[in-house]
Amino acid sequence: MGPLSYGGSFYSSQFEAYFSQLGSYFLELERFLIEVQGEQNASKDSAQAIFNSSHKLLKFLPRKGLTLDIFIRYLLSDDQNGPLLPLGVHHDMSAPLAHYFLYTSHNTYLTGNQVSSDSSTDPIIDALKRGVRVIELDLWPNSKKDDVEVRHGGTLTRPVELYKCLRAIKENAFSASEYPVVITFEDHLKQTLQAKVAKMVITIFGELLYHNDAENLEVFPSPGSLKRRILISTKPPKEYLDDESSTEREDSQKQGSSDEEQTQNTYKKKLGATDKVLLDEDEDQIFPEYRSLIAIHAGKPKGGINDCLINTNTVRRLSLSEQELENAVKTYGAAIIR
């Protein structure tokens, strides 16, 4: 196996065998410094000094020696790397958006911990000024059920108005970069409030908002083509209701309900009284404005990760935990890279 690039340095699978031999890893590191890194004056003592000065790394060293994982930690550690290169675009930005890593935030609106802190526009503004390109907002009804607020549901966090968050994004989205900003909605709203969100988003962002036929999109547009555009990403409304109502549908099926009756029951339980007049219309008529906002569909299709990676001609945002991703790589590694 030839050398592989990792964090600006190179290593090969041979290092794992070398470093697992107790007492030999400093010698092998010396060889690496000389032959790969080009440090001709490196010695065994200088290799050992690198690790002696890295207390964060030393505490992870196993008794059996330096493993490949620890070697990678060394390559990426702050102590072993000089100042960052000046920021700037040095890649081809004309490939589809999915070909890039995006600087992403989580619960962007929180000022502190995820249990009891305040929600505010300040961390959103700070994130955008640091170049973050993906902002996450959790959407919930307010206490009167007549407006939308942003908060971490099921916790003691205090809310902030959605309107203020969207204004903060518009005013600061491109302060650090002209490349697109993606707003991910975690949506916990009924249809009337989704319509209110749609109106709010369209009014605030105007021509900055990017629209596409997301349901039939075979490849994402490129960052270069999306400069100074805002993209909304969330589950389509019907998928959200399906996920929230899966238990209710199972109960209906056990009672022998028809498919049509099950669909009606799902909507009746999730939509407010003023929305029920729309139940006889199809989905696109029920959710036209909100659905049209979604530039990047989110969520797993009914066939799970296999359909996302193998058996589909459309693209979407797939959220996986670290463990789910590790498990998926074992079976779908090539498809995930693709």
Image (cartoon, grey):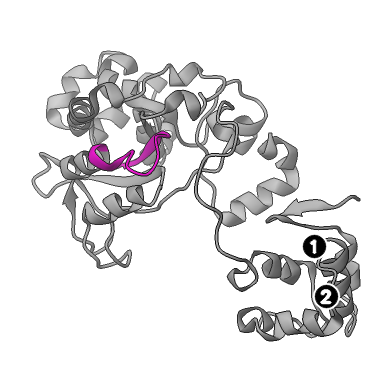
Q: Is residue 105 visible?
A: yes
Identify the residue position indicated by label 1 in the image: 37
Q: How many marks?
A: 2
Q: Is residue 332 left or right of residue 169?
A: right
Provide the secondary structure element on which disc 1 rests.
loop
Residues packed near mark 2 inside 10 Å, few (<14), some (14 to 19) or many (20 plus): some
| Range drawn in magenta | 170-188
- The image quadrant of residue 187 is top left
Q: State the residue at coordinates (82%, 80%).
A: 65
Residue 195 rendering spot, x and y as whole percentages: 20, 27
Q: Is residue 215 above or below residue 141?
A: above
Q: Nearer the viewer, residue 171 or 60?
A: 171
Identify the amino acid type marked 2.
Ala
Looking at the image, is mark 1 or mark 2 earlier in the sequence? Answer: 1
Q: State the residue at coordinates (26%, 20%).
A: 289
Identify the amino acid type marked 1.
Gln
Residue 219 rendering spot, x and y as whole percentages: 56, 22
Q: Which mark is residue 191?
A: none
Find the distance from the CA under tag 1 to the CA under tag 2.
Answer: 10 Å
Verify CB contact (< 8 Å) between mark 1 and mark 2.
yes
Residues packed near mark 1 inside 10 Å, few (<14), some (14 to 19) or many (20 plus): few
Identify the residue position indicated by label 2 in the image: 42
Q: Is residue 165 above or below residue 275?
A: below
Provide the secondary structure element on which disc 2 rests.
loop
Q: State the residue at coordinates (40%, 42%).
A: 247
Query: Is residue 273 found inside the magenta-colored segment of the image?
Result: no
Where the C terminus falls, by quadrant? top right
